[in-house]
Image (cartoon, helix red, strand yellow):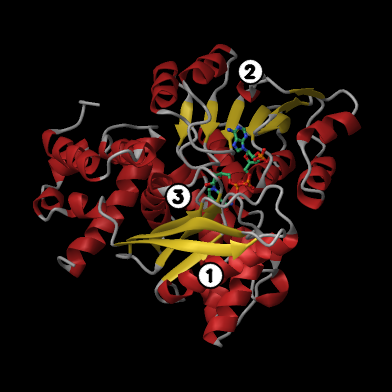
């Protein structure tokens, strides 16, 4: 951790000192600072105006108690978070995560990443993130609803269409957004569609929002292939996870001509050499909220392996779509040995720094999540546009906008990497392009 330029090293040390124990946040900050050496050399004004130091300190951090009553009549207490990280480009925008591992360090890492991701979309949105250590798994519908209502009973006073616009993330899908929106509407007596994104299609939601992150990752990967003069045709693809991002990544990869031969959940992996049966996967995971064991039981030739690591299945392209730090140095070495050529992150920060280093050494193209998974938030911003104009676009029109945005992000990453002397390095391109856009806005807005 000492390869940073001197000015950036000071910033990093300050982040470590001021945010003890928040290892994921430290990692996310380091990854960005590690790319900014050539930027501070070329543009000393960013360091002089303390833009980078200011960027590392959230504008506002909200932590609150969420008390609710379970089906046995017992009072349960969870902790809620909203980190409003940076609003130089627009209202804070970023999802809510409900998962037992959520704590301040996770929400801050996600919020920090979100700043640069949102900038890369070219849309007017700032960066934020939130969530709770509530675990929806095994909870009844009534419990999930009561939890969401309790969560919104505090959160409502901090959000608004011009202030902060949350959306879904792990553990927060259409069902939870519905309960959250319902409670916001009840408390405020306002039908303010633009306060949340990921809403249902019948009440202010956008076409393609559900599919957008996975589709966007597949589109980004297609652009990488195109830049190498290739396509998805004949490519074997491995996707980790089997949640929202993973399922729609599988769908779009298949539509674009690739074959997804394995996916996973937190209990194990399924290997299906004929190609994942998407209808069955959706039925098991989306309709029934079941486990992958059921997929393997119902599908001829598919193998479920409880101890199995999804990255051991040989592939040309790997799309980690589950969670942070799920692909480590060992996994990266296995992928390289098996001939994997491209890794594009559908999840946020799924590859450890060591894995990223190994990919670089081996010449594997690596696309970071803040670029490759930006399709979700981009489509959320399109939902905000439709809400603001009381309009609703067709699936085809919205998907075309998404594909156009993903192509734009891809090209911007490549052009920026080239401009700063690291051609083909998507991580450099994404971090520098995202950073300079936010930093220029911060300079223009003064010290606030
Ligand atoms: P979901 O909750 O819908 O799905 C997460 C999936 O990952 C589940 O299948 C889960 O399995 C699996 N999983 C969790 N931990 C592990 C693990 N250690 N190993 C293998 N599988 C695991 O979440 P999303 O699909 O919404 O989000 C996935 C990632 O994408 C997160 O990093 C999120 O921040 C990021 N992201 C999501 C966006 C969105 O629009 N939803 C936008 C941009 C990024 P199980 O069911 O067993 O828990």
CA distance separating discs 1 and 3: 33 Å
> Which structural element holds mark 2?
helix
Task: Tell me if I can see residue 404 in this picture.
Answer: no
Residue 183 in the image, given as x and y percentages of width and height: 59, 75
Q: Quadrant of residue 19?
A: top left
For the point 35% across and 42% down, the residue is 25
For the point 79% across and 30% down, the residue is 275
**Residue 97 vertical position relative to residue 229 in the rendered view, above or below:** below
Q: Quadrant of the N terminus?
A: top left
With 248 as the anchor, is 378 left or right in this view? left
Packing grade of label 3 (10 A; few <14, some 14-19, many >=20) is many
User: Which numbered tag is attached to residue 87?
Assistant: none
Residue 317 in the image, given as x and y percentages of width and height: 60, 28
User: Which numbered tag is attached to residue 409?
Assistant: 3
Task: Tell me if I can see residue 412 in this picture.
Answer: yes
User: Which numbered tag is attached to residue 152?
Assistant: 1
Whether the residue under disc 2 has CB within 8 Å of ligand 1: no
- Which marked residue is nearer to the observer: mark 1 or mark 2? 1
**Residue 45 vertical position relative to residue 125 in the rendered view, above or below:** above
For ligand 1, the image quadrant comes to: top right
Q: Earlier in the sequence, mark 1 or mark 2?
A: 1
> Which structural element holds mark 3?
helix
User: Which numbered tag is attached to residue 312?
Assistant: 2
CA distance separating discs 1 and 2: 42 Å
For the point 63% across and 18% down, the residue is 312
Q: Quadrant of residue 293?
A: top right
CA distance separating discs 2 and 3: 30 Å
Q: Are marks 2 and 3 in contact (CB under 8 Å)?
A: no
For the point 48% across and 74% down, the residue is 156
Q: Quadrant of the C terminus?
A: bottom left
């Amino acid at each position: 951790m000492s390869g940073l330029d001197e000015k950036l090293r000071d910033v990093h040390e300050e982040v470590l000192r001021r945010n003890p124990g928040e290892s994921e946040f430290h990692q996310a900050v380091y990854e960005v600072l590690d790319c900014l050496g050539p930027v501070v050399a070329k543009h000393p004004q960013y360091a002089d105006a303390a833009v980078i130091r200011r960027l590392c300190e959230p504008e506002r951090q909200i932590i609150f108690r969420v008390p609710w009553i379970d089906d046995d009549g017992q009072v349960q207490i969870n902790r809620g978070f909203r980190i409003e990280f940076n609003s130089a480009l627009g209202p804070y925008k970023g999802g809510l995560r409900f998962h037992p591992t959520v704590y301040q360090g996770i929400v801050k890492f996600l919020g920090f990443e979100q700043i640069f991701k949102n900038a890369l979309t070219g849309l007017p949105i700032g960066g934020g993130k939130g969530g709770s250590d509530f675990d929806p798994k095994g909870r009844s519908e009534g419990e999930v609803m009561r939890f969401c209502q309790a969560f919104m009973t505090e959160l409502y006073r901090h959000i608004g269409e011009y202030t902060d616009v949350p959306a879904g993330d792990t553990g927060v899908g259409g069902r939870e957004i519905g309960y959250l929106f319902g409670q916001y509407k009840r408390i405020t007596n306002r039908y303010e569609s633009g306060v949340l994104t990921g809403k249902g299609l019948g009440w202010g939601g956008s076409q393609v929002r559900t599919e957008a992150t996975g589709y966007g990752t597949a589109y980004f990967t297609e652009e990488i292939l195109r830049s190498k003069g290739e396509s998805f045709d004949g490519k074997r693809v491995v996707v980790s996870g089997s949640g929202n991002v993973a399922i729609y990544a599988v769908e779009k990869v298949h539509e674009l001509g690739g074959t997804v031969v394995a996916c996973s959940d937190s209990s194990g992996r399924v290997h299906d050499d004929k190609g994942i049966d998407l209808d069955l996967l959706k039925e098991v995971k989306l309709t029934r909220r079941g486990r992958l064991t059921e997929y393997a039981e119902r599908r001829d030739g598919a193998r479920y392996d409880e101890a199995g690591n999804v990255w051991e299945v040989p592939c040309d392209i790997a799309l980690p779509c589950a969670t942070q730090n799920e692909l480590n140095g060992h996994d990266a070495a296995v992928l390289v040995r098996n001939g994997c050529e491209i890794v594009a992150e559908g999840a946020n920060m799924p590859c450890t720094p060591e894995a990223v280093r190994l990919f670089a050494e081996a010449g594997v193209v690596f696309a970071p999540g803040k670029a490759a998974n930006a399709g979700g938030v981009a489509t959320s911003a399109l939902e905000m546009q439709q809400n603001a104009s009381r309009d609703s676009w067709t699936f085809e029109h919205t998907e075309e906008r998404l594909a156009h945005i993903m192509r734009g992000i891809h090209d911007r990453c490549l052009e920026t990497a080239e401009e700063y002397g690291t051609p083909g390095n998507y991580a450099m391109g994404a971090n520098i392009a995202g950073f300079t856009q936010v930093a220029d806005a911060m300079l223009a807005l003064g010290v606030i």
